[in-house]
Amino acid sequence: MSEEKEITIYDIAKHLNISATTVSRGLKDHPSINIRTRKKIAEAARQLGYRSNTFASSLRSRRTQTLGVIVPRLNSSFMSAVLAGMENAASREGYNLIIAQSLEQANKEMENAETMFNKRVDGLLVSLAYGTESIQHFDIFFNKKIPVIFFDRVAAHPDGANVVIDNYGAAYQVTRHLIQQGCKRIMHLGGNTLLNVYADRLRGYKQALADHKLPFDEKLVLNGNLTEEWGTEAAQYILQFKAKERPDAVFSANDTAAVYCMIALKAAGIKIPQDIAFAGFNNDPISKVIEPNLTTVNYPGYSMGQAAVTSLANHLNGNTDINATNTIVLRSELIIRDSSLKNK
Amino acid sequence: MSEEKEITIYDIAKHLNISATTVSRGLKDHPSINIRTRKKIAEAARQLGYRSNTFASSLRSRRTQTLGVIVPRLNSSFMSAVLAGMENAASREGYNLIIAQSLEQANKEMENAETMFNKRVDGLLVSLAYGTESIQHFDIFFNKKIPVIFFDRVAAHPDGANVVIDNYGAAYQVTRHLIQQGCKRIMHLGGNTLLNVYADRLRGYKQALADHKLPFDEKLVLNGNLTEEWGTEAAQYILQFKAKERPDAVFSANDTAAVYCMIALKAAGIKIPQDIAFAGFNNDPISKVIEPNLTTVNYPGYSMGQAAVTSLANHLNGNTDINATNTIVLRSELIIRDSSLKNK
DNA sequence: ATAAAAAATACAATCGGTTGTATTTTTTAA
DNA sequence: TTAAAAAATACAACCGATTGTATTTTTTAT
């Protein structure tokens, strides 16, 4: 239809024979503009095909209605659920999302942070990269009082809020469940313990053992990157044990490693759960497909994304002080499936 | 470290006793600025902690270095691969991504398009929603010569480019493969045929049947939303056939439906592939976990994302005319696994 | 009817770069 | 040595909305 020249508030002003100021305020429903005038302005704007110029607006008002998101990787079932939840909440709150991935590299994460900073995002949502050891690169945000929320993979910072699940508690529950099934030598497949998520899961595992008077054996903990290949390798590690010493259960810090470990063990003739019981973490779609179905922890990615954005938006709107709610812990739950049910 | 007042080009200008114009041009390596001056400017900028103000820049130059992405849903394995590829290419080309989901609703898609338009994205990447019947809401972009690229779920438009795979050809190959395995009554689980992807897959299926002198039977085509639940229901449909008429193969338009259909059939005592052979589409992670492993078509989501963004960026940089390359077809490949190997 | 208070509107500076054109400086050629 | 051409830099308007303050209009009270 129409095109050519862009309509500005000045065009509306001229059209109605009023000032640009009034138009500007009228369009935002400013109370000091007569309600009839506001109506006329809105009508004229519609007629003329006006659309607001975000830059001009942001340039002056210093707000962009944009949130930055930095994640290690976009392509995981968990992360895409998080993003879906974030997008949902952001759109409800009138924000847009700018998304970047660090690919697990600290320097990429720093670059991303800088870009987001220059784009003047109103707030930042971060799940930290594998390789990130310091979070100094977010100081530019803290210094400018731009709120930063860490989720999933978090770091402690006096000015940043965290959105997490109770990794410790969940891991404790999983381990206790395995113990209750009669398992005595429970192996743990873990991730990089520099990251809170994996450190906490390991802690929960250890504590559950201790509370049930089971010894902690270093040989029963294997840390790695939790990929398909690594899960397969972990199976080889398990098969090396002498019959007597072989673990009778595996608690993996994610479902991918658990599933590929199971596949390899099954191929080697191990019966699951009879010989070795299994439990994973995340409730990834593959956990419902593997046979036997994998016991796991439901990690509410969608809710986490929503919670993180909602909390950020509340803060930006001045509804809540971000320091008041420093940490949000979401409920996760143990999902028991056949892979861990020895007595059935 | 530093904070307080923002450094502008005027500060740099004053600092070096030159004009703001020179600073502006110098920062962009404009050829008409002496190279020594450029060095001095860059150095001063660094020292003073200057960061460019995107709005001021965009306001004048009318470019945002931002691309809009509208997808039906973020949380699918395929889409997250696409996004990862897009982000990768975008970051390489110096663009940011603004992402929104239509949740398969046409009106949400329209809203998103409008927001993107107001945010003045330099280009738009779209995979259409289920419910979208007209693509008029993108006319605002076409009118302003803002390039739009459709991917995966596309629509024909004289000014819009498409990035797709050869759905027809892939479906043809899958069907032919099943026929070559000796299957005679091949069922097709399909999606909404208003969408190119599903329409083309159905066409490929039909043509392969025709080319091999197999009759087309309407009762052997079931269209639905291809979810887990629907896949389970499809199994019930299949079980209703009389023994003689029961399909001996299933070609599903996605892996999710295929896998959940398989699970239900296996529970009912059907042997796969002996009784019924299976093939899916997408190469979803679950296809490698189900037993037997699912024959499928590898859908290169990551490459698709990269290709779409790269093509858009090239166009924006004036390297290529978008009308010159109207359609990009990516290579997909048939992955044969045990679920379809009857003779083994 | 008139002064004071409240409501509505307008003025004008501002945000921070960008860009067409003009001016100054340097280089080249005669 | 000087005029012409090329290179480098500066001027100043501009992009389009926002906002503190001033002005005008309307309402209220006396």
Image: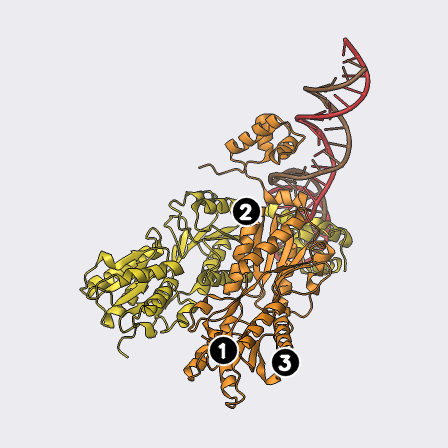
Chain colours: A orange, B yellow, C red, D brown
- Picture coordinates of residue B49 (x, y %)? 73, 58
Name the quadrant of the C terminus of chain B: bottom left
Name the quadrant of the N terminus of chain B: bottom right
Identify the residue at image location x=62%, y=32%.
A26
Q: Which residue is mark 1?
A: A277
For discs 3 and 1, the disc positioned in front in the rendered view: 3
Marks 3/2: CA–CA distance: 63 Å
A222 is higher (above) or lower (below) than A51 = below
* Circle 3 SS class: loop
Q: Residues within 10 Å of mark 2 (few under 14, many from 20)?
A: many
Q: Nearer the viewer, residue B109 or A207?
A: A207
A134 is higher (above) or lower (below) than C25 = below
Question: What residue type is disc 3 on?
Answer: Lys
> Residue most toward the front?
A343
Question: What residue type is disc 1 on?
Answer: Ala
Circles 2 and 1 on the same chain? no
Q: Which residue is mark 3?
A: A213
Q: Nearer the viewer, residue B18 or C12?
A: C12
* Circle 1 SS class: strand
Q: Chain of mark 2?
A: B
Q: Chain of mark 1?
A: A
Q: Which residue is mark 2?
A: B120
Tell me which label, 3 or 1, sits earlier in the chain: 3
For discs 3 and 2, the disc positioned in front in the rendered view: 3
* Circle 2 SS class: loop
Q: Is residue A250 visible?
A: yes
- Picture coordinates of residue A74 (x, y %)? 53, 63
Q: Residues within 10 Å of mark 3 (few under 14, many from 20)?
A: few
A53 is higher (above) or lower (below) than B128 = above
Q: Nearer the viewer, residue B197 or B314?
A: B197
Q: Residues within 10 Å of mark 1 (few under 14, many from 20)?
A: many
Marks 2/1: CA–CA distance: 55 Å
